[in-house]
Amino acid sequence: MSVKERLQEDLKAAMKSGDIQRRDAIRLIASAIKQEEIDCQKTLTEDEVVALLMREAKKRRDSIEEAQRLKRTDTAEKEQFELSVIESYLPQQLTREELEAEARRAIEETGAKSAKEMGNVMKVLMPRVKGRADGKLVNEVVKTLLGG
């Protein structure tokens, strides 16, 4: 079942159960997908939907950080709930250990020795972890392994 189909089924279930918070979060996600399809004038592929969900998740993480910095716990909690709903539609995320193993393999393949060669490692690594790891975390792990 595609992500868009799961969204529709979950929206129906949330409406039937009266879960307003979940219903609204799912509607936000579906709306973002629909808007992207309108902007691109095409139906999004499954990979494009996952990429969109990753962007939406990143927006929520940034909003949570900002809300916590401003001590807006109500906003942070709302964004945290939306983030958890978005993440439920993303592929299983890699743990830091799994990501480090992938990064070590990519470093070995590229022969990178210093942080100056980080770009080469990222070119090899990012397609492998696409949709399964946050780019910021990937960058941090590679930088640490290369001693940057």
Image (tube, helix red, strand yellow):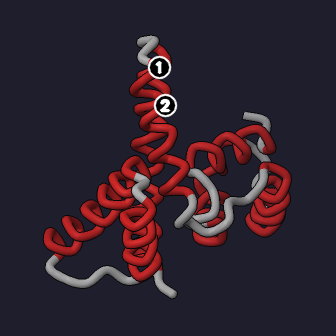
Residue 145 horizontal/vertical position (percent)? 80, 44
Confirm whether residue 124 shows in the render: no
**Gap between marks 2 and 1 measured at Cα:** 6 Å
Residue at (79%, 36%) from the top-left corner? 147
Residue density around tag 2, few if under 14, some if 14–19, many if 20 or more, within 10 Å: some
Residue density around tag 1, few if under 14, some if 14–19, many if 20 or more, within 10 Å: few
| Amino acid bearing label 2 | Glu
Confirm whether residue 68 shows in the render: yes
> Left or right of 82: which side holds 130?
right
Element type at marker 2?
helix
> What label sits on residue 73 in the rendered view?
1
Query: Do the CB atoms of the residues marked 2 and 1 lie less than 8 Å apart?
Result: yes
Residue 4 horizontal/vertical position (percent)? 39, 78
In this view, 55 is above or below 11: above
In this view, 59 is above or below 6: above
Question: Viewer-proximal residue, 89 or 141?
Answer: 89
Residue 10 horizontal/vertical position (percent)? 45, 70
What residue is disc 2 on?
77
In this view, 72 is above or below 49: above
Question: Viewer-proximal residue, 69 or 30?
Answer: 30
Residue 110 horizontal/vertical position (percent)? 74, 65
| Amino acid bearing label 1 | Thr
Q: Quadrant of residue 53?
A: bottom left
Q: Name the residue at the front extreme.
A: 17
Residue at (40%, 56%) from the top-left corner? 18
